[in-house]
Image: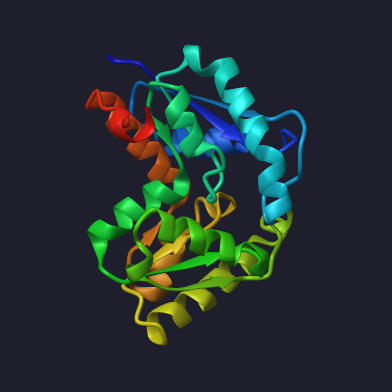
């Protein structure tokens, strides 16, 4: 059996989610895939603002360069993909961000997609990322559920209902054909949401995992003409 070693970096300054995230990733990993989840050791509790993003950017790059030789691919576990594009210029292995992976998969499932994320403070940053990746003409809207990342699991039923309500609005009022969960803290909810709204729902962490596995198995890495 071929062993695939994937490093997942949680771009936060604590290890609160390291064990639970590894369990979630392993639940969806292919046989033979090994997952290691680490955090930055310092930095914000979550990445929800421009200040948070700016703070974690150099820390993510530092942590990735420190550990990249031990792994076949790397995932930065935040929907804003902090450091992903820079790391592609520094590391000649698959580097995957949840946003870019989710958009690629959603583009295969429908033309118009909506994104449900956490707080309104992240909306403009997500929109900028989507447009930078070339999917702006397919994004119908982004909606926040006004629950901070750190509180998503405090009342999972409240979180689920909020995501369902926002997703339903995107489908019924904005004509979204696919929903993307715009926060990796929402991992594990996609199938419940899909059953409630009857359109495909893309889980960003799982999308990143499957994209990383595919790139390793296909022996593909980013183009040097773009990333040097």
Q: Quadrant of residue 193?
A: bottom left
Is the N terminus in the top left, top right, bottom left or bottom right quadrant?
Answer: top left
| Colour scheme employed for the rendering of this structure | rainbow
In the drawing, does residue 98 fall left or right of residue 15?
left
Kindly identify the residue that appears in the image at 72 percent across and 33 percent down: 15
Is residue 75 visible to the viewer in this orientation of the structure? yes
Q: Can you give x and y, in whole percent of width and height, for residue 45 in the image?
A: 76, 45
Residue extending furthest toward the bottom: 173
Q: Does residue 220 lie above or below 192 as drawn? A: above
Position of the C terminus, as image quadrant, is: top left
Q: Residue at x 76, y 37 (%)?
A: 43
Between residue 195 and residue 14, name the one nearer to us: 14
Horizontal side of 9 relative to 90 (left or right) equals right
Res. 74 in view: no
Report the side of 2 relative to 164 (left or right): left
What is the number of callouts on the image?
0
Q: Is residue 186 above or below residue 218?
A: below
Q: In this rendering, is residue 153 above or below 227?
A: below
Q: Residue at x 71, y 48 (%)?
A: 52
Residue 19, x across and y down, in percent? 63, 32
Identify the residue at horizontal 56%, vertical 24% (top origin).
64
Is 52 rendered above or below residue 147?
above
Percent of width and height locating residue 46: 70, 48
Residue 217's quadrant in the figure?
A: top left
Of residues 192 and 81, the one nearer the viewer is: 81
């Amino acid at each position: 059996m071929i062993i695939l070693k994937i490093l997942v970096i949680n771009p936060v300054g604590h290890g609160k989610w390291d064990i639970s995230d590894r369990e979630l990733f392993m639940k969806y990993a292919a046989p033979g895939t090994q997952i290691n989840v680490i955090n930055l050791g310092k930095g914000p509790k979550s990445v929800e603002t421009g200040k948070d993003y700016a703070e974690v950017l150099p820390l993510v790059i530092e942590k990735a360069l420190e550990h990249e030789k031990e792994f076949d691919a790397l995932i930065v576990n935040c929907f804003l993909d902090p450091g992903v594009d820079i790391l592609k210029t520094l590391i000649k292995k698959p580097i995957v961000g949840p946003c870019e992976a989710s958009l690629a998969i959603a583009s295969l499932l429908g033309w118009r997609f909506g994104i449900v994320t956490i707080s309104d403070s992240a909306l403009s940053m997500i929109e900028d990322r989507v447009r930078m990746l070339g999917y702006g003409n397919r994004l119908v809207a982004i909606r926040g559920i006004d629950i901070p990342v750190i509180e998503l699991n405090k009342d999972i039923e409240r979180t689920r209902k909020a995501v369902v309500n926002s997703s339903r609005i995107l489908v019924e009022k904005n004509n979204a054909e696919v929903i993307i969960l715009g926060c990796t803290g929402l991992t594990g909810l996609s199938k419940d949401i899909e059953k409630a709204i009857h359109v495909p729902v893309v889980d960003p962490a799982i999308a990143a995992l499957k994209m990383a596995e595919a790139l390793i198995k296909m022996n593909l890495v980013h183009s040097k003409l773009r990333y040097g």
